[in-house]
Image (cartoon, grey):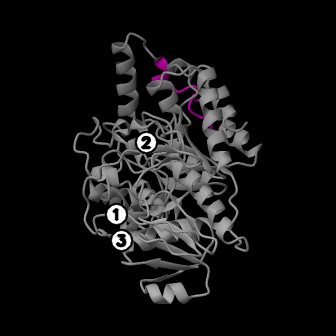
């Protein structure tokens, strides 16, 4: 495929790679020579301000030609069959062509880039109590498409228009996949606690008016030891499970059992041989490079391998710093791109994509995956009952199936403890796989 653009740029190359190469399986060559483009017998896409006969045309805005970051004034509008569009740019003149000519009603490249790069997240200064970008400040939330994988819908319609222009074109066919991911924030409720942790838990239960003697004498079956149950339900539907381990010193929002404890080592050995295991950088490590590096070193000691999969605790990521740190430590796949208080698609896609560092106009070799639903969000933030959560999960999964995307859920092994209010949430977990 030959693509014309008056000003080739890193941003343009990034989004062409994402949409054409990674998603549609189309190799392309970029040119800024209009004469060469018009004379070429190749299949062609024109990205410009003037329409060209006999090819597919995308009207170009300025976003991909800029090198700086500035606030964009965007108001999505409804447009069938695209659902919603923005960066609507009209060609000045559309003559009566003699050759079949297709053109889009908006700059799909700029619009997709805006969403995938998380452009809007670079400007917000008022964040939540954990210094995270709030979903309520996103374009997707404001215009009610947070639960819609909009970029994937655009891509499917774009593919149809490409094949309308070029019926002989063979495109890569997507396939729906599901990935079950589990964060191990608390490996066990009672097992493996240090003497200090046991004492703190017991004293805390007294202050809450519910003395818990199990804190001092662990029961035979720990309420958080739900690993076999979780794995069995996913495996019955041939769905892959990935585990993310929190390996931090106890304190603040990081309250797992000691990383070097016998119980933690036994759990690691049990899971690492059969499942993908990744690092779950702690709350503190999310803002401290020294701790971040220490936790990676500890992961390597305990797993005898480098961490290549990651999800940050509390989904606490900063753009672009978090991904720059990941690159230095060899992370290849990250599963942090979700909101903790809302379900849906943070980057308006259900498919993996590479991170683009807007501050440096550079593509990083890290694949970003977009979980769209989390147990704690459903129960504690949206205050859903189990049957309501099951229905919402079904709707989200249906949205992903329509676009042959990647349906990723986040769960916790601790989210079945009836003493903590998780009665019947085992049914919600099982509903993930229906």
Residue to which mark 1 is pinned: 63
Reply yes or no: does residue 30 show up in magenta: no
Please tell me how crowded label 3 is: few (under 14), some (14-19), or many (20+) other residues with Cα within 10 Å.
few
Q: Determine whether, in the image, residue 168 is placed left or right of residue 32.
A: right
Residue to which mark 2 is pinned: 140
Q: Position of residue 85 (x, y in %)?
A: 47, 49
- The residue lying at 56 percent from left, 32 percent from top is 224
Front of the two marks 3 and 1: 1
Q: Which of 72/320 is in front?
A: 72
Residue 321 in sight in this render: yes
Q: Earlier in the sequence, mark 2 or mark 3?
A: 2
Front of the two marks 2 and 1: 1
Compared with residue 156, is residue 182 higher up or lower down, i.e. above or below?
A: above
Residue 285 in sight in this render: no
Compared with residue 373, is residue 82 higher up or lower down, i.e. above or below?
A: below
Residue to which mark 3 is pinned: 362
Q: Quadrant of the C terminus?
A: top right
């Amino acid at each position: 495929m030959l693509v014309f653009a008056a000003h080739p740029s890193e941003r343009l190359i990034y989004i062409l790679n994402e949409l054409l190469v990674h998603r549609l399986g189309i190799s392309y060559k970029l040119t800024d020579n209009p004469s060469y483009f018009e004379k070429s017998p190749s299949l062609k896409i024109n990205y410009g301000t003037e329409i060209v006969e006999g090819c597919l045309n995308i009207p170009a805005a300025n976003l991909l030609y800029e090198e700086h970051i500035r606030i964009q004034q965007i108001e999505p509008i409804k447009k069938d069959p695209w659902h919603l569009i923005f960066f609507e740019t009209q060609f000045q003149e559309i003559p009566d062509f003699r050759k079949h000519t297709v053109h889009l009603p908006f700059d799909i490249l700029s619009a997709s880039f805006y969403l995938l790069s998380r452009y809007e997240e670079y400007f917000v200064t008022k964040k939540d109590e954990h210094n995270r970008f709030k979903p309520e400040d996103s374009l997707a939330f404001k215009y009610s498409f947070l639960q819609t994988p909009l970029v994937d819908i655009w891509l499917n319609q774009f593919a149809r228009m490409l094949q309308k222009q070029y019926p002989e074109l063979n495109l890569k066919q997507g396939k729906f996949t599901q990935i079950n991911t589990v964060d191990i924030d608390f490996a066990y409720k009672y097992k493996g606690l240090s003497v200090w942790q046991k004492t703190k838990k017991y004293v805390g239960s007294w202050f809450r008016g519910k003395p818990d003697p199990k804190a001092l004498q662990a029961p035979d079956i720990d309420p958080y030891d739900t690993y076999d149950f979780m794995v069995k339900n996913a495996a019955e539907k041939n769905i892959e499970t990935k585990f993310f381990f929190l390996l931090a010193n106890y304190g603040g929002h990081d309250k797992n059992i000691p990383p070097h404890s016998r119980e933690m080592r036994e759990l690691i050995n049990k899971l690492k041989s059969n499942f993908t295991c990744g690092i779950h950088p702690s709350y503190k490590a999310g803002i401290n490079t020294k701790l971040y590096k220490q936790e990676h070193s500890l992961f390597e000691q305990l797993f005898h391998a480098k961490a290549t999969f990651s999800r940050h605790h509390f989904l606490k990521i900063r753009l672009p710093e978090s991904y720059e740190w990941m690159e230095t430590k060899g992370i290849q796949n990250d599963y942090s791109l979700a909101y903790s208080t809302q379900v849906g698609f943070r980057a308006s896609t259900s498919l993996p994509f590479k991170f683009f560092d807007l501050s440096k106009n550079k593509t990083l070799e890290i694949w970003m995956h977009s979980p769209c639903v989390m147990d704690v969000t459903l129960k504690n933030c949206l205050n859903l009952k189990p049957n309501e959560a099951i229905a919402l999960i079904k709707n989200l999964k249906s949205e992903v199936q329509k676009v042959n995307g990647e349906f990723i859920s986040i769960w916790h092994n601790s989210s079945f403890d009836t003493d903590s209010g998780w009665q019947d949430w085992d049914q919600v977990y099982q509903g993930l796989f229906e």
